[in-house]
Amino acid sequence: MKFKYYIALWASKLAIVALKITKHNATNFPGIVALKICPDFLKYVAKPERIIAVSGTNGKTTVSNMISDILRADGKNVMNNSKGSNINTGIVTAFIYGTSVFGKCKKEIAVLEVDERSVIRIFPYVHPDIMLVTNLTNDSIMRNAHPEYIRDFLNKYIPKTTKMVLNADDLITSSVAVENDRVFFGIDKMETDVTECINLRNDCQICPKCHHKLKYEYLRYHHIGKAYCPSCGFKAPSYDYEGKNDNLTDMTIEVKDKEGSAVYSLPNESIFNIYNLVSAVAVLRELGYSHEKLVALFSKLGIDRTRFNEIKVGSNTLIKLLTKEKNALASSRVFDYIHTMPGDKEIIWMNSCQGDIESWSENTCWLYDCDVEFLNHESIKHIIVCGPRRFDHKLRLKLAGVPDDRITMVEKEVDAPSKLRWIKDDYIYVLYGTDSFDLGMKVADIVEGLMQERKDETNG
Amino acid sequence: MVRVEVLFPEIANLSGDLQNIAYLKRCSDEIEVIEDNLIDEPMFLSEKPDLIYLGNTTESGQKIIIEKLSLYKEKIIELINENVYFLVTGNALEIFGRAITDNDGKNLAGLDFFPIITKCDMLNRYNSLYLGNFVDNENEIKIVGFKSQFGHSYWTDKETSVFDKECGYVFDTIKGAGLNPDITFEGIRKNNFLATYIIGPILILNPLFTKWLLKEIGVTKPALYLEEDIMTAYNARLVEYSAPDKDFIYH
């Protein structure tokens, strides 16, 4: 088998050369080649001294990039899969890049973003020293069923030797790998917290011990918050790494642990990103970094506070927002965000799954787990539904109470911009999915073109 | 009042299933919804509801619900025999069978009302569209929907089950899987106990079936909320699913 491994390594190295010549860089092709020749390639490939895995429903790309960037800023030779995918072919590709033609590992540390369902193909051969699980929330019901299923799946494959860094504000995540060495991060009460869930989706409503309904000292959204059982006394784990005193004016948060604390700059005001920062600090602290050094390293990175590709032309502002299709929670977060933003808004809602159009039809159950009700807000003056699921989207908006006169329906996404009402100073949101990314950019370009025309007319 | 009893909404709530009842309520002021939590004694023990609803749940949810409903088996059998309406969606159907098994060796005993064995493949989720007919006396209604499940259920000999396998089915499949991919009969029907593998907002997707149900459970003026929009969406989906080249199994 070792012979096969070397054939696979060399063939995939040649594939990398071919890709460079043809200017195809970010691809899993080398990994696909390697696995075709040697299916247990990961068993034989040389590993770096330390391996960090980052998984979870949301934030794993951002956090793994953040950790890699900090390690690189500290001069470490880091392997990661940011240029490929987070499934086994992407992980294998990262290892191929990190291995010499003689099979020696060229990197000292790996930071791997790992898709939750891909652990079955990765963890039998790659044993992380530290694994972060950011959160486990509702995702595609077709692929991921429900968060408990993903928790149980992770539990089956996470090596017993891996130290876990887990989100204490998510009871599903905090019940991952209970027999492992574990530490927890979380964020103390925030100004926007509530105590009762207002979302349609709440995947953790009962006490795991006695099945009474859980209560929350504070709740952020869905099942993310500090839970306790008023009946049996069950409590969410305490924080080993606690985000506290968040200050959205200064854009800072303090992260405290048993050895001290420091104030870190926030990338933006979204709670998702505050969790991302706290979890990254927790992992880096576990790697032995002092707060002092981390604050210095984070400041070296600089912070890009550009928000969501925001473009202002004339009196209107275009905002392109990824709104993952077939994902109730991701869409709920976007809808929640939009309704809290200042100004009048128009929305082009176009995140139908394009891949399903050809021969299948999108499973639209997610619309009824999604808090479309956030779009029934006085500041949202007009919503254009378009694409293959436009009838479903219109019905869902009306069930959410959005008045008929605020909804326009057009068949084709590219025709949606022509239906904009151009309310003075309004914010135009284009909501596209991962699957409709290219189409979303095309529609956004049309909107931007119209904005420019309107500006020119006004100036002319 | 027409009383709809929702069983264990805190755990039987996946894939938007609870919106079925939210929609029913919006169709008629006559409907009163009663939610039974796990720690409550179900209302059906003391009063007869007009409809009992149980939605799609997690695997641990199935186990908890089986434990809870096992306490009231006799009463539930009595209600089924008295023609009380039940609507059971998604994998909640499996709770009423003999056993739920999986490829890791799980063998969870169900309520054993019906002689079905569920076989789950926890590594491979079965996703499909559904098109079928609902037939009840003179009514024939086209049904559209989604399936997303780990298990399929297979009829077996009566042995210990309360009802025999001559029980009826809920839908006659045109495209998609029945109770399992080998048969066209979908769901389980015994008197007015209706259990289907279809998940999610089945009553929002199928307005004609909803109207039938409203009438059957005793709503005096069955009318659909947002009828025009809901019928438009239904008709569009029906055309889409009826297209001969439409692939039903998700690959």
Image (cartoon, coloured by chain):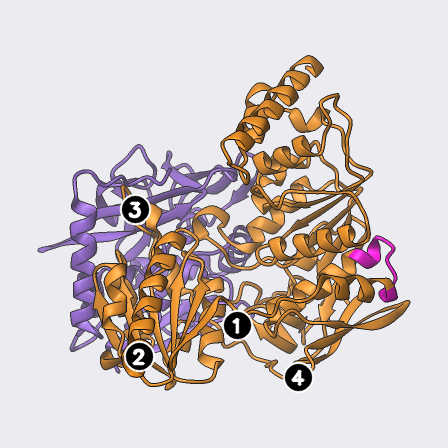
Chain colours: A orange, B purple
Residue A249: which disc?
A: 4
Instruction: State which chain disc 4 sits on.
Output: A
Instruction: State which chain disc 1 sits on.
Output: B
- Measured Cα–Cα span from mark 1 to mark 2: 35 Å
At which x and y percent is residue B227?
A: 17, 71
Identify the secondary structure beneath mark 1: loop
Closer to the N terminus: mark 1 or mark 3? 1
Q: Which portion, as a residue range, is magenta?
A: A284-292
- Residue A390 appears left or right of B112: left
Three-letter amino acid code of the residue under disc 4: Thr
Residue A402: which disc?
A: 2
Relative height, residue A207 to residue A24 (above, below)? below
- Residue A239 appears left or right of A176: right
Whether callout 3 and callout 4 share a subunit is answered no
Dividing the picture into quadrants, the one containing residue B56 is bottom left
- Residue A182 appears left or right of A443: right
Residue B129: which disc?
A: 3
Q: Nearer the viewer, mark 1 or mark 4?
A: 4
At which x and y percent is residue B22?
A: 34, 72
Q: Quadrant of the N terminus of chain A?
A: top right
At which x and y percent is residue A193?
A: 61, 80
Q: In the image as oriented, which residue stretches furthest toward the left?
A: B138
